[in-house]
Amino acid sequence: MSQCDLSVEIGPLRLKNPVLTASGTFGYGREFSDLVDLDRLGGIVVKGLSLRPRAGNPPPRIVETPCGMLNAIGLANVGLDAFLKEKVPWLRSLDTAVIVNIYGHTLSEYGEVAAGLRGVEGISALEVNISCPNVEKGGMAFGTDPEMSARVTAHVLENTDRPVIVKLSPNVTDIRETARAVESAGAHAVSLINTLTGMAIDIERRAPVLANGSGGLSGPAIRPVAVHMVYQVAGAVGIPVIGGGGIMDYRDALEFLMAGACAVQVGTANFVNPSVSTDIIDGLRRFCEEKGVSGIAELVGAARK
């Protein structure tokens, strides 16, 4: 039989396959260029970008945990100006979607970063990280308040000419409320989940391992939580859902797709196996061909039917 069609549509964005690398786990892409054929990927989501450069948190800021890891990198990045001058020219040479993850600590910062990327060739979409502290509201994360999440979404949309994907925080009572809020504000898609908040204690020092105290938990330990949240959100909104959280192989990716995700993001697994994303693409194709599936889109939401 003919090869399975792996292409998917995320709002106005068409991807050659549903496998993306997750922000913060793949650098700016170039770091992995000698290890994996980047042009085979559905897309690359670059590490979170802010208006000005950030050094991030002091070390130690990564610790391995059972079935995962905690990180408190602190969103270290080169800042908007350096990104445009040093990173975009190379990213523009890739034959895959480049999605820029952006964040801010005020509403205006989100808008300024988005505006700075307006019209820049080689950028396919923006992913908006709303799991950042709102310094104007006492440090509460934007993503824990549906109203603020909607305001950030609307403000970014006012300042960009690209599709907008909003990355949802799982550290809420009901993630569907946030998803509905950003959909109503005009988001083209949502991605979920961001990391869960966690902590590790050094029993010898009697203190947290991470200098920051707490960090974001990722890896296989969070996958069942992520699959459930994707299942919930896919049933609550009409816009495309991108799923992620602990994906290690194509079987994990299929769980998210069958729960209702149109595409997936691979994160922590990149540190274990740099070519994991292309391995997943190959695995999805084999699965489809073995099961007689002509297009991967047929499997989206299959567990909901």
Image (cartoon, rainbow, N blue to C red):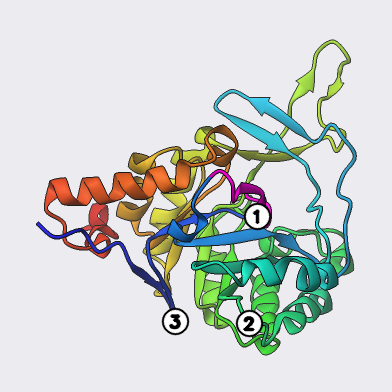
Q: Residues within 10 Å of mark 3 (few under 14, many from 20)?
A: few
Q: Which one is nearer the viewer's eye here, 297 or 289?
A: 289
**Classed neighbour count for the residue bearing mark 1: other residues with Cα under 10 Å, few (<14), some (14–19), many (≥20):** few
Does label 2 or label 1 sit earlier along the sequence?
1
Quadrant placement of the N terminus: bottom left
Q: Which residue is mark 3?
A: 12
Most prominent secondary structure in the magenta stretch? loop
Is 27 part of what is drawn in magenta?
yes
Horizontal and vertical percent position of residue 105: 83, 66
Which numbered circle lies on residue 121? 2
Amino acid type of disc 1? Arg
Magenta highlight on residue 211: no
Question: Mark 3 to mark 2: distance in Å?
Answer: 16 Å
The residue pinned by badge 1 equals 30
Camera-nearest label, 1 or 3: 1
Q: Who comes first in sequence, dot 1 or dot 3?
A: 3
